[in-house]
Amino acid sequence: MENLFTIWIKVFNRFCYDSCIMIYITVYYPFFKRLGAFLVLLALAFPASGQQFSVIALGCNGGITDNNLSAWLIKPADCQRYLLLDAGSLTHGIDKACANGLLSGFPVDGSRSPLDWTLKEGIEACLISHPHFDHFAGLVAVSPDDVPKPVYGSPSTLLLLQKHVFNNAVWANFSDQGESPRIGKYRFVEIFEKCPTRVGDQGVVVTEFPLSHGGMRSSAFLLNHCNNYMLYFGDTGADVKESSSLLRDVWQEVAPLIAKQVLEIVVIEVSYPAPRPDNLLFGHLTPSLLAGEIQNLTELIPGEHPEKKLEKVLFVITHVKPVAGRSNTLIIENQLKSLHIPGFRFVMAGQGMLYSNDILELK
């Protein structure tokens, strides 16, 4: 049996222990609370290093063949499903990406084809930059066998698709708007100019910017996931040729992101080699016109040595148009190289290929 002295010692020790805990909470809790808030703000201000976005080219030509038209699968590193940016050619591009081992998740027992799984399970949502057929025909073609999903675009883009494609005359109305009967498979969702919009359920936020494409309103999409960014351009002409400042508006938005080294990839068109007569540009870029736009962007990047910061961004050149049935890809690539654009790092897009900005792993 314990004596009274032993019991008293235990009570005293317990009192001291509880008192120390109370002193710790009273004195140090506000400090750790403030420290926690500081660490949260620090994480927001300085996002995790390393590339976030993987970009797969399902289609990257501007014509003439109909099996390699603008369509891109985008997936942040920790996401399971893709966003589809434009949908010119889907089936052939998915088949090529699968053949290159870039798509996974489909059953290996052969119960479903990679194409069927990617269309129905792999793609969460679609964004359409403008309603020209080389950016949309693939979605029309697969619509009878597709599953319900949201289709995002500017109000004018979705209205034109509703009136002139999904109108029960040109094609059955697979959308949820416009002419009856409406099948309702594609839920049209408007993205308003410069208004950040959550797309899908994986934390991706998209901001839409208007572009001038020879009289057609096109769109650029700035994608944000965990404070890492990529920028996708639909068809666009140069400001100097389109008598606009729309590209400059985009550059002003992304220049600070480049300075912070959080803009990873820019997918942008160069449709024709230079020189190209103005009346035959049709609202597109040439290497020399893109060089002028990159110079405009560089001038807007804050801080010293902006070209060094620009080097961290990977530009993926797309939408090359063949002329007289011959590819212009090598011509455009050589012209871009010969221009020696300071800080401009680029690759030419190829169908079924994967692009990610691995240089960010070094920052």
Image: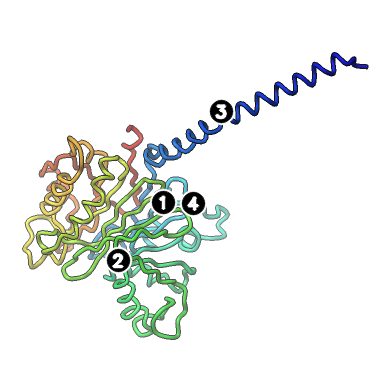
The tag earlier along the polypeptide, 3 or 1, is 3
Q: Is residue 290 visible?
A: yes
Identify residue for label 3.
Answer: 27
Instruction: Give the image location of residue 302, x and y in percent.
Output: 20, 41
Q: Is residue 119 above or below residue 332?
A: below
Residue that numbered label 1 is attached to: 75
Give the amino acid at mark 1: Lys
Residue 169 in picture, x, y percent from top left: 35, 85
Q: Marks 3 and 1, Cα distance to the nearest angstrom?
A: 46 Å
Q: Amino acid at mark 2?
A: His
Residue tagged 4:
80
- Residue 191 point in image, percent of width and height: 35, 65
**Residue at 18%, 59% in the rendered image:** 271
Q: Secondary structure at mark 1?
A: strand
Q: Nearer the viewer, residue 76 or 298?
A: 298
- Does residue 289 lie above or below 77 as drawn? below
User: Are the residues at dot 4 and dot 2 in contact (C-beta closer than 8 Å)?
Assistant: no
How far across and down, in percent of the image, does residue 340 sit?
12, 41
Q: Which mark is residue 135?
A: 2
